[in-house]
Image (cartoon, rainbow, N blue to C red):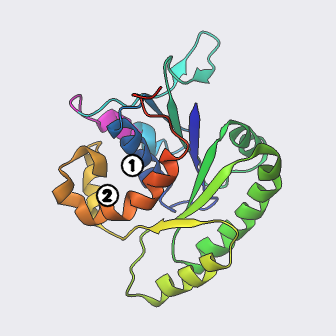
Amino acid sequence: MQVVVVANPKGGAGKSTLSTNIAGYFASQGHAVMLGDADRQQSSKLWLGLRPPSARPIQTWDLGDDEIARPPKGTTHVVLDTPGGLHGKTFKQVMKLATHMVVPLQPSVFDIFATRTFLDEVFENRRAEGLKLALVGMRVDDRTLSADKLRDYASGLEVPVLTYLRDTQNYVHLAAGGLTLFDVAPGRVSKDLEQWVPLCQWLDAGSKSPANG
């Protein structure tokens, strides 16, 4: 089972936006997807409640008689939206589950400093776990100095930066209806889909297509 954890220690980094759209991408490829929400704000769970019946299915946790949350039977792809300040026991549990970790990073000096410390902790655990790790720039305006600084910072990391996603209301409007970029006509969001190509390719490298089992 492919388990993609979306994590960043700082609140408001874009974790839920990234999580819901990754889940939407997997669903668009015909995978059996579960979107788990470990964040107290339950943003992803709320989003699932807004998702229309006509959209491709994305499941949430099954709660057994023992009250332990598990992926529904038959799930092939799990996306976990994690809380800000992820650390300690919860962090270690997530690291054991994850096959992939995507870290959203905004062009802010505060986000950069917080993320650096978090990545150091991930590196310490990653060596034993063999985790695939990557960064995604969030709400990046190419015309700004902060975007340039983010690229300069990212170039010195040992972690690949897969893509930079622009700051657009498309994500806001789609989320309000429980939808993702992958649920609407491509022509409506072509520029955004183009930015997602490197991330989707990275995710696909760890996936099996339904057709190939």
Q: Is residue 46 left or right of residue 71?
A: left
User: Where residue 208 sits: x, y (%)?
Assistant: 49, 34
Instruction: Report the residue at 71% width, 62% height from top.
Output: 119
Using the image as rendered, state which of residue 197 and residue 78 is in the foreground. Answer: 197
Give above or below for 55 relative to 185: above
Is residue 73 one of those drawn in magenta? no
Residue under label 2, please give it: 171
How many numbered marks have been drawn onto this rendered protein structure?
Answer: 2
**Mark 1 vs mark 2, CA separation in Å:** 9 Å
User: Where residue 2 sits: x, y (%)?
Assistant: 57, 36
- Tag 1–tag 2 contact (CB < 8 Å): yes
User: Where residue 51 sits: x, y (%)?
Assistant: 29, 36
Q: Amino acid at mark 2?
A: Tyr
Instruction: Report the residue at 48% width, 46% height from top.
Output: 204
Is residue 48 one of those drawn in magenta? yes
Q: Give the structural element (helix, strand or loop) at label 1.
A: helix
Mark 1 Cα shell of 10 Å, populated few (<14), some (14-19), many (≥20): many
Instruction: Report the residue at 78% width, 41% height from top.
Output: 89
Mark 2 Cα shell of 10 Å, populated few (<14), some (14-19), many (≥20): some
Q: Is residue 50 left or right of residue 199?
A: left
| Residue found farthest to the front | 212
Using the image as rendered, state which of residue 187 and residue 171 is in the foreground. Answer: 187
For the N terminus, give its image quadrant: top right
Give above or below for 141 relative to 102: below
Magenta region: 46-54
User: Where residue 40 sits: x, y (%)?
Assistant: 55, 43
Residue under label 1, please give it: 21
Q: Give the structural element (helix, strand or loop) at label 2.
A: helix
